[in-house]
Structures are given as C-alpha cells and as structure tokens.
Amino acid sequence: MAADWHDFEIDEIPEWSATAQNAFFAVLSAILFCLFMYLLVLPLNEQETQAKQEEGILKGQFRLKAQQVAALPNVDTQLEKLKIFYKKLTEQLPEEGDLAVLLAGINDTGLQYGLHFERLSWEKGVQVGWLYQLPLDIQLTGKYRDVGSFTAALARLPRIVALQDFTLERTKEAKDVLRFVVTAYTYRYIEEPGEKQ
C-alpha cells in the first residue's frame, strides 16, 4: 500500500525511505533556490539594469561634453569676432557731446543737396533695452533726386542714423518740389555703473 504523506514527520527524516528523502531534499532545494533568486539575484539584476542605463546616460553626457570642448577654440574665435563687432557698433553710437555735431552734420548734408529745412530738432528720448533711443524730427523740402541723395548720405554717416515713418508729398508751390517729413533715430549706449569704456 502506498504511503500517505501524513505519515512523514520532519523529525523522522533519517528513517524515511531513500526515495522520500531524495524527493524532500529536491523540493527543499527548489524552494531554497527560488528564495535565493528572489532575495539576492533579482535585486542584483535590477541594479545591473539601472547601472547600464546610467552608463548610457553618462556616455551620452561625456560625448556632448567632448564635442563642446572640441568646439571651444571655435567659440573663442567667434567670441573675439563678436567683441570686435560690438566695439565697432558702439563706436558708431554718439556720445552726449556728439549730438550737436551730428545735428550740424545732418543740416550740412541737407544744405549740400540744396534742401530747405522747415524743422530739424531732437525729440524726447526713450530707453530701449541697453540703449537710449533719440528721435530727430526732420521736415524739409527739395527736389526728388536731392531728397534721395540726402537719405543715402545719412546712411553713410559715421554715426548710426535710422530713418522711419516718413511721408513724401508734392508741395503746392512747385510741382517738382517735394515735402519730406521723417523721424530719424540714433542711439546712445547706456553705460552700466562701474563700467569702463
């Protein structure tokens, strides 16, 4: 008659048959193996997966840093060019004392082309970022070609002068004479406190 599993007591293992002992130790080994895998191997596997992901991220960051370091000489060259351009640009911005000279230069340029000024005066300025924008109200009359030559001459001035919001219309007195009304803007650099020029 087959043995009932209730007949097997743990404290009587030495008295069990060889088959029962082998079966018990096989089941016990399988349970211990599963427990070992669950408690030790699986966490290590998760740590390894995490470490591989971190390694991939770090490799990507390293490649990016290496590319940035390789580009540094180029960035230095670009920075030097930018500084030179910035210096040239700020030199084209008039200082406070240059405004009267600039106004006289614009007046002389207009007279050179035979234009008659009705109005040539500075308006109230406004701060725009790190610059101070100074509008100049210009109203003059003259022939079409002379007005065009005047505006081209303003673009060649050593100081920055931008023409905006203009109107051009014929005068009632003469058909070949135009009335030119424009706002010219120039800019002054606002020096930060403690900044040296």
Image (cartoon, helix red, strand yellow):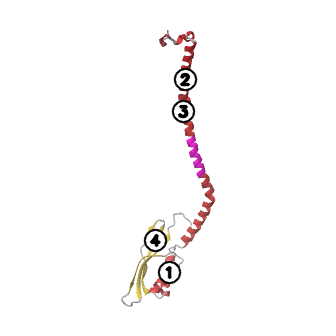
3 vs 4, front mark: 3
Image: 173 above or below 17: below
- Compute the Cα span from label 3 to label 1: 78 Å
How far across and down, in percent of the image, does residue 13 sit? 55, 12
Q: Is residue 98 above or below residue 173?
A: above
Q: Is residue 182 above or below residue 68?
A: below
What amino acid is at disc 4?
Gln
The secondary structure making up most of the magenta span is: helix
Q: State left or right for residue 180 relative to residue 194.
A: left
Dot 2: within a 10 Å radius of its alpha carbon, few (fewer than 14), some, or many (20 or more) residues?
few
Where does label 3 land, which residue? 43
Tag of residue 36: none
Question: Sequence order check: which comes first, mark 3 or mark 4?
Answer: 3
Residue at the (57%, 37%) spot, across then down: 48
Q: Nearer the viewer, mark 3 or mark 2?
A: 2
CA separation in Å, label 3 and label 2: 19 Å
- Residue drawn 56% across and 42% down? 54
Marks 4 and 1, how far apart at CA: 21 Å
- Which residue in the protein does label 4 denote? 133
Q: Which mark is residue 30?
A: 2
Q: Select label 3 or label 1 by which is in front.
A: 3
Residue drawn at (54%, 32%) of the image: 42
Q: Quadrant of residue 29?
A: top right
Question: Where are the magenta residues, as a range?
Answer: 52-64
Query: What residue does disc 1 label?
Result: 152
Contact (Cβ within 8 Å) of mark 2 with mark 4: no
Residue in front for this viewpoint, 9 or 173: 9
Q: Earlier in the sequence, mark 3 or mark 1?
A: 3
Badge 3 or badge 2: first in the primary sequence? 2
Give SS at disc 1: helix
Q: Earlier in the sequence, mark 1 or mark 2?
A: 2
